[in-house]
Image (cartoon, rainbow, N blue to C red):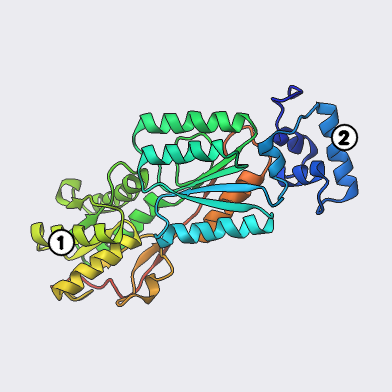
Amino acid sequence: MPRPGPRLRLADVAERAGVSLATASRALAGRDGVSQEVADRIRQISADLGYVANPYARTLAGGTSATVGLVVHQVDDPYFSEIAGGVIQVADEQNLLVQICHSGRDPGHELRQIRHLIAQQVGIIIIAGSGYTDAVFESEARAALAAYIGTGGRVAVIGRHSLGVDAVLPDNEAGGKALGVHLLGLGHRRIAVAAGTAGLTTVADRQAGVLAALAKAGIAAGDVPVVHTDFTRDGGRAAAERILADHPATTAIIALNDAMAIGVLSALRARGIPVPDRMSVVGFDDVSVAADLAPSLTTVRLPMTTMGRTALDLALKPAAARPRRRATGHTLMVRDSTGPAPA
């Protein structure tokens, strides 16, 4: 049995009652939305366990003071805005507020944002975006989040590997393979990668998928130009310029997110290089504008709004003995930016 007193969490009461965290908190706060029978049972379980409310758990009832802290890498990237939309949908359904923080893909700044949210006593923290290959940062973030969870806070992440919490895992490696296979099927053999910021696990996983597909076709990793720049539209433009200068025989560019792909298309347009007749381009994510570009972008679709919804749904569930994992799947969206390799 959980220990009574301040260390007992609202999640323990919810788990014992077989209800969600939000339902347990509503019942104990006397709010609407819970039947009298269920509310009485939850209160009795709380009294039997000796639960003492804490500021994190109490705010999860869905009252106006309840806050979800959402940390994203880049607020103006459609990938994160669509994820945020999913988080906000569930928050609205639960009468929760959402506070969005921007990390700029800086692990130190992201850790400061996490600690700031903890100090603000938000009820839930959602971290959306790639993990980092820096083990020191990951261990510091993991320790901060573990302490927060120990006081009643809840956490879920999107795209993380090693924080020991509930996670929604984008299908990054398999999606990278799908892009490589698609271009190989069109006859491309001189393929370059606009890879985005080094040190991000998302970049590493997507790149690994691409290189695995090419290796299976006999193209060694050392023969594939990989250019690391910012994981942004400007980064994609810079990567394309370097690829064109250093590897002019390239016939296809794989950008590891759609923002970079948009930058690649911009650079090619400025150079008068026709897509896809001379150069094929692919992206990853399928942000809302991808189908409206000219040419429309071939890319891997991730269910970004659903990912945001799933992350907050996980955080609202009673705590599990082990971190829960939810895979996203992926869909290859073939559009006008890819075509047969030029003769």
Vertical placement of residue 187 versus 58, above or below: below
Q: Is residue 292 left or right of residue 37?
A: left
The answer to whether one can see residue 279 in this image is no
Residue visible at 29% across and 63% down? 261
Q: Earlier in the sequence, mark 2 or mark 1?
A: 2
Q: Is residue 14 left or right of residue 104?
A: right
Q: Quadrant of the C terminus?
A: bottom left
Vertical placement of residue 183 versus 24, above or below: below
Give the amino acid at mark 2. Gln
The answer to whether one can see residue 120 in this image is yes
The quadrant in which residue 153 appears is top right
Give the amino acid at mark 1. Glu
Residue labelled with disc 2: 44
Vertical placement of residue 101 versus 15, above or below: below
Query: Tag on residue 241?
Result: 1
Q: Is residue 71 left or right of residue 239?
A: right
Query: Tag on residue 38?
Result: none
Residue visible at 80% across and 54% down? 33
The quadrant in which residue 273 appears is bottom left
User: Residue 26: x, y in percent?
Assistant: 78, 46
User: Residue 238: x, y in percent?
Assistant: 19, 59
User: Residue 40: x, y in percent?
Assistant: 89, 41
Q: Whole-Å distance between the Cαs marked 2 and 1?
A: 67 Å
Vertical placement of residue 132 versus 34, above or below: above
The foreground one among 54 and 77 is 54
The foreground one among 188 and 291 is 291
Dot 2 lies on which element? helix
